[in-house]
Amino acid sequence: MTGLTVLAGGLTGATPTRLAALDPTAVRQISSVDDGSKDGDKKKDDKRDGKKVKEVGCDPDELIAALVRANADKGAKLELEEKCTYTLTAFQDDNGLPVIVQPVSIDGNGATIVRAANAEQFRIFNVGVGGNLKLRDVTIKGGDDRTNIGGGGLLVQQGGRATIQDSTFTLNRTTTDGGAIANFGVTTILGDVDHGKDGKGWNATTQIRNNTALDDGGGVYSTGRLIMKDSRVSHNSSVNFGAGLENEGGVMELTRTRVDHNTTPDDAGGIDVEIGSVTKVTHSWVTDNTSGENAGGIGNFGGTLYVKHTDVSHNRAATNAGGVGNFGGGQTVVEDSKINENTATELGGGVDNFGLGEISEFVLRRSEVNQNRAVGPDSQGGGVANTGDTTFSIVDSRITENLATNPPGGVFTGNPITVDDETVIVKNRPTNCEGSVVEVPNCFG
């Protein structure tokens, strides 16, 4: 995708700079500042914690006016009317609200900001260079971006920052990337969750759900730095890659986050990691996602992927890699995790590692790959498949009860791999490793 350079509210096409060059500690909370108001507005100003708060009545025009003043007066802290619905009908430069170029904090009090159903298409929020937006306890709904930039609910440009807390992005859409959010800057998404047992049945206060991208990143598309904690990304769709999230050349960190029930007819139903990207997923769940091609759960296509204490289960790929796929020279490490009950119709019900020209590297350590299936007419490697130009190391792991139509059901490899003597490969059907092109060490039958 073509990126952008922004000059105080204008957009011009250019390739975005990789955020890896930015200071990774540079994410900061938005400071609340005096909104500079000196007139007799209908709503009073209120001081809380020594900082002035501007109350915004239940009127979209009042919200727009408050943001215009905030940009002119070096920022503001705004408080929306409790449970109000701010329905936007007009727009400027494809945005329903003014481009934010100052520190602006919005406490939503459970309010909703929505594009009117009969309005022309526009996104909701746009954070420009120097903008620093904090959203809390608000729902962003119905944004419809038709530009070549993306972000139906929120666009964070290079040089912009956003912090989203206890909020929902739903039913947003874009014809390009990032159905809910397109991040080219620094974005932090925070919530709170009652995880429940094994991550099931819990409710997140921050949700990215039911959004659509006609290109990549149905929920979130990022080329910058993205941090997500205690949140849920669910029931999003994309026409191309990364129905849940896509990291294209940036840095992405997911912690205690659930990525589930996202769908694409192409690659990477849950999370897509593109070339040059760095993605870390810890203490999370990637479940029940579907791809029409490769990588039902997580697909690494030439980037760096680290997964730890994470459950990757019940995902489905129409071709290879039901759970985790590592392709195109990608480097993937999975530690202390579960890759269980995923399905592919060709190779690698649980894991598929494939390289062509560039070496794809995979390390599986202290993890389990159980009850996965590769069920197409020519399928092999119900648990693990490793073919092409690759390296694969399996350390202190369990690969059990996986199924393939053709042997082997456990581990299939086309070149030498490393399997330590602490690893257990048993109860796979029709065989554990017999039928592999290259013998699998420490595997019987």
Image (cartoon, grey):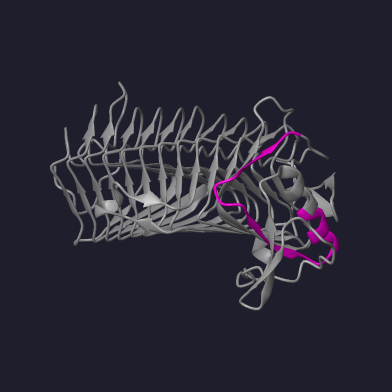
- Seen in the picture, residue 207 relative to 53 is either above or below; the reply is above
- Name which quarter of the figure residue 251 lies in: bottom right
Residue nearest the viewer, comparing 40 with 180: 40
The magenta span reads 66-89
Left-right relation of 423 to 227: left
Q: Quadrant of the N terminus?
A: top right
Residue at far bottom of view: 50
Residue nearest the viewer, comparing 351 with 147: 147
User: Where residue 361 sits in the image (x, y, percent)?
Assistant: 44, 53
Q: Can I make out residue 15 in this image?
A: no
Residue nearest the viewer, comparing 80 with 210: 80
Q: In which quarter of the image is the C terminus?
A: top left
- Seen in the picture, residue 121 relative to 36 is either above or below; the reply is above
Q: Is residue 301 on the magenta stretch?
A: no
- Name which quarter of the figure residue 192 lies in: bottom left
User: Where residue 278 sits in the image (x, y, percent)?
Assistant: 55, 57
